[in-house]
Image (cartoon, rainbow, N blue to C red):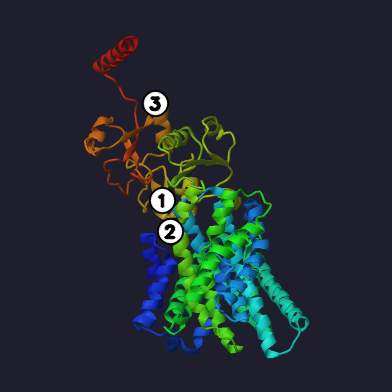
C-alpha cells in the first residue's frame, strides 16, 4: 500500500503537473488518520524508526551525489553568498521566529529552524521549469537548493547533538559539550570520505563487477551510516552526506552507471517516507497548527526569507530584480519533512516535545509550495525575469541539413542549440547566428557547462548512425525515451547486422530517411517548408499542396509543443498547427509563372498611382 500510494501519487503528479509532494501528503493522510487503512507504527513496530533513519540517510547521500563543485563554479557569487552567509542568517532568524512567534521551546525552535534552511531541488526544479525563469536566477535557486540540502541536515544534527549532550549532563558548559561534538563530526566525515575513496578505487579497476556495483554502493552507505552512529548519535547523517559529496567530486567514470540508482532510489524512498510520515499524523498533532503558527508562516515567507536574501546579497553584483525574486521563492520539500520526522522521534527521548515537528513541517511544505507555485510565474513576469517557455530542441551534429532544420525552428520561435565537437563543422552555425555549443555531448563536462533545462527534445543527426544511437541511448534517461530522435529507419531487431531499436532513438520521418538520404536530397535542392493549418485549410489540403515526394517531419502547436512524425507515431494535426516538411523544390507551371508576373505588374502599377 505504501508503494502504491507513494509511486501512484508521483505518477498522477507527472500526468497532471500538480506538485507530487502535496499529492503524497494527501494520499498518506487519507490512508492513515482519515480512513484508517493502516497505522505505520502498528504495521512496522520497532522497525519504523530505523527504516525512516536509513531512508533519510540514503536521501542525504543521493543529495550529496548531486553536489558537483565543478558545476558549482559556474553558478557565480550569488550561490556562495546564499550558502556561506544566507544559511546561518536564515537559521538564526528562523529560530527567533519559531520561538517568539510560533511558540516552540528554544531547543525545538533552533533544531526546526536549522532544517528550514533547506529548500530542495525536488520542488525547486519543477517550479523553475513551469515558469521558465531566466538562466541566472534559475541557476542560483537550483544550486542553493542542492547545496542547502546537506547543510540544513548538518544544522539539525549539530543542534540535536548539543541538546542531547546537555540533557545527559545538565550544567555542562559550552566548552565541555561542543569540542566532543566537533571531534565526532570530523571522525564521521573521515569515515564517509574513506568509504568514498575506497569505492572510487575499486569501481574503475574492475574489483566490483557491474551487476554488484549498485548493491555494493547501497550497502556501503548503510554500513557507513550505522558505523558512524556508533561513534555519536546521528553522526551517520554527516558521514553519508560527506560520502556523497566526495564521490560526486572524484572523477569516477563508472559512476555514470549508478545514475539510474540515484533516480530510482530517490523516488522509492521519497514515496515511502512521505507516505509513512503523513499516515503517522494524528489529529491531536494538528492542534499545533493554530493562529500562532499561521503568524510564524507569514514571518517565514515575508520576513525571514527576504531578510536572508537581502542581507546575504548586500553589495553583490546580483541585480535588484533578481534579488527580489530570490527573496520570494523558497519552497520546502522532502528533506524538510524527512529530517523533521526523524528528529521528532529523537527529541522525545531527551525530554523535549518534538511531536509537533511532523505536522509543522508538512504545513510549511504545503504553504510554501502553494504560495510560491501559484505566484512564481506572476512574480517573474513583473520583475522581467521570464525566459522562453516554449520547449526547445537540442540538435547534435552540425551539418547543412541540421543547420537548415535549426533555422526553420528559429523561424517558428522554438529554442534550438546546435552541438558539435568540431569547431570547423560549427562554422556554418556561427555564420547563421545560431546558438551553438562546442564540445563533446557525451563528455561529463558538458553537463556542467551546458544547461539542458530549456530543451525538451534531442535530435541526433551526425554522419555516424552508431554515434547517433549512442547519444540517444545516453540522453533517453535524462529527457525520456520518446523524446530522443535520430535519422535512419529502425530495422528488424532480428537483423544481426543492424543496431537494435532498443538502443536507438526514434526514427525521424515516417519514410525513415537516413543521413545519406537527407544529404543527397539537400544537394538536389530539397528544403524545409512550413504550412499553417486552419479550419478551412486542413491537413489533407496541406498534403495535396505539397509535392508527392515530400515527407512530414514535425508539427508545432500554438503553445510551442512539438510532435514528430515518425515510423512509430503519427500526431493528429489540428487547426492552428504549423506543419514542417522536407520537400523537393516546387516546380512552377507556365500558368503559375504568368500569374506571378501579372501580380507583380499590378502591384507596381498601384504603387505608381
Going from N to C along the chain, the mark reached first, 1 or 3, is: 1
Callout 3 secondary element? loop
Callout 2 touching callout 1 (CB < 8 Å): no
Tell me the distance, in whole angstroms, between the alpha carbons under discs 1 and 3. 29 Å
How far from the left and from the top, in percent, is residue 386? 49, 47
Q: Nearer the viewer, mark 1 or mark 3?
A: 1
Mark closer to the chain start, 2 or 1:
2
Identify the residue at horizontal 38%, vertical 65% (top origin): 11
Quarter of the figure with the N terminus: bottom left
Helix, strand or loop at label 2? It is loop
**Please, which residue is most extreme toward the right here?**
175
Residue sitting at x 30%, y 12%: 606
Element at badge 1? helix
Q: Position of residue 415 (x, y in %)?
A: 46, 42
Residue beneath disc 1: 483
- Tag in front: 3 or 2: 2
Residue position for label 2: 374
**Is residue 66 at all visible to an observer of this figure?**
no
Q: Nearer the viewer, residue 122 or 582?
A: 122
Could you say which is closer to the camera, residue 149 or residue 2? Answer: 149
Percent from the top left, x then y, of residue 559? Answer: 36, 45
Instruction: Classify residue 394 as left or right of residue 596.
Output: right
* Mark 3 neighbour density, 10 Å: few (under 14) some (14–19) many (20 or more): few
Circle 3 residue: 525
> Does residue 261 appear anywhere in the picture?
yes
Amino acid at each position: 500500500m505504501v508503494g502504491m500510494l507513494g509511486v501512484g501519487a508521483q505518477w498522477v503528479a507527472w500526468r497532471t503537473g500538480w506538485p507530487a509532494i502535496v499529492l503524497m501528503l494527501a494520499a498518506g493522510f487519507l490512508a492513515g488518520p482519515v480512513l484508517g487503512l493502516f497505522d505505520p507504527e502498528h504495521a512496522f513496530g520497532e522497525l519504523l524508526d530505523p527504516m525512516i533513519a536509513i531512508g533519510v540517510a540514503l536521501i542525504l547521500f543521493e543529495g550529496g551525489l548531486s553536489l558537483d563543485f565543478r558545476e558549482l563554479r559556474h553558478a557565480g557569487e550569488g550561490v556562495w553568498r546564499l550558502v556561506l552567509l544566507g544559511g546561518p542568517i536564515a537559521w538564526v532568524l528562523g529560530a527567533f521566529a519559531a520561538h517568539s512567534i510560533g511558540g516552540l521551546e528554544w531547543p525545538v525552535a533552533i533544531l526546526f529552524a536549522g532544517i528550514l534552511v533547506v529548500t530542495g531541488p525536488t520542488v525547486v526544479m519543477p517550479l523553475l521549469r513551469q515558469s521558465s525563469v531566466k538562466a541566472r536566477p534559475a541557476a542560483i535557486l537550483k544550486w542553493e537548493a542542492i547545496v542547502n540540502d546537506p547543510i540544513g541536515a548538518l544544522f539539525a544534527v549539530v543542534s540535536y547533538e548539543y541538546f542531547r549532550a546537555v540533557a545527559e549532563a545538565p550544567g555542562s558548559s559550552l566548552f565541555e559539550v561542543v569540542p566532543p561534538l566537533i571531534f565526532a563530526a570530523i571522525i564521521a566525515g573521515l569515515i564517509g570520505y574513506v568509504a568514498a575513496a575506497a569505492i572510487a578505487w575499486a569501481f574503475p579497476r574492475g574489483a566490483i563487477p557491474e551487476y554488484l556495483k549498485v548493491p555494493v554502493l547501497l550497502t556501503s552507505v548503510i554500513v557507513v551510516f550505522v558505523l558512524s552512529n556508533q561513534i555519536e548519535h546521528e553522526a551517520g547523517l554527516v558521514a553519508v552526506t560527506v560520502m556523497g559529496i566526495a564521490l560526486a567530486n572524484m572523477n569516477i567514470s563508472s559512476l555514470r552507471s549508478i545514475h539510474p540508482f540515484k533516480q530510482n532510489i530517490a523516488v522509492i524512498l521519497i514515496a515511502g517516507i512521505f507516505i509513512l510520515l503523513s499516515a503517522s499524523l494524528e489529529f491531536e498533532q494538528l492542534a499545533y497548527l493554530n493562529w500562532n503558527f499561521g503568524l510564524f508562516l507569514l514571518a517565514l515567507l515575508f520576513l525571514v526569507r527576504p531578510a536572508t536574501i537581502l542581507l546575504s546579497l548586500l553589495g553583490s553584483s546580483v541585480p535588484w530584480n533578481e534579488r527580489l525574486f530570490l527573496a520570494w521563492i523558497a519552497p520546502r520539500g522532502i528533506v524538510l519533512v524527512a529530517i523533521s520526522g526523524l528528529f521528532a522521534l529523537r527529541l522525545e527521548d531527551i525530554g523535549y516535545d518534538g511531536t509537533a515537528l511532523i505536522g509543522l513541517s508538512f504545513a510549511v511544505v504545503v504553504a510554501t509550495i502553494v504560495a510560491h507555485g501559484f505566484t512564481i510565474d506572476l512574480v517573474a513576469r513583473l520583475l522581467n525575469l521570464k525566459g522562453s517557455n516554449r520547449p526547445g530542441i537540442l540538435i547534435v551534429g552540425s551539418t547543412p541539413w541540421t543547420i537548415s532544420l535549426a533555422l526553420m525552428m528559429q523561424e517558428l520561435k522554438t529554442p534550438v542549440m546546435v552541438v558539435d565537437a568540431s569547431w570547423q563543422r560549427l562554422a556554418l552555425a556561427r555564420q547563421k547566428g545560431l546558438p551553438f555549443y562546442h564540445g563533446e555531448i557525451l563528455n561529463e563536462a558538458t553537463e556542467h557547462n551546458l544547461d539542458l533545462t530549456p530543451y525538451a527534445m534531442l535530435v541526433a543527426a551526425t554522419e555516424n548512425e552508431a554515434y547517433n544511437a549512442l547519444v540517444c541511448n545516453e540522453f533517453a534517461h535524462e529527457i525520456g525515451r520518446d523524446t530522443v530522435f535520430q535519422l535512419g529507419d529502425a530495422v528488424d531487431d532480428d537483423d544481426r547486422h543492424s543496431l537494435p531499436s532498443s538502443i536507438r532513438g526514434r526514427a525521424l520521418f515516417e519514410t525513415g530517411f537516413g543521413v545519406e538520404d537527407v544529404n543527397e536530397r539537400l544537394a538536389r535542392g530539397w528544403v524545409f517548408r512550413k504550412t499553417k493549418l486552419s479550419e478551412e485549410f486542413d491537413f489533407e489540403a496541406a498534403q495535396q499542396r505539397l509535392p508527392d515526394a515530400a515527407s512530414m517531419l514535425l508539427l508545432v502547436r500554438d503553445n510551442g509543443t512539438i510532435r514528430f512524425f515518425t515510423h512509430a507515431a503519427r500526431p493528429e494535426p489540428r487547426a492552428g498547427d504549423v506543419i514542417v516538411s522536407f520537400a523537393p523544390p516546387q516546380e512552377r507551371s507556365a500558368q503559375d509563372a504568368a500569374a506571378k508576373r501579372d501580380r507583380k505588374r499590378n502591384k507596381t502599377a498601384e504603387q505608381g498611382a
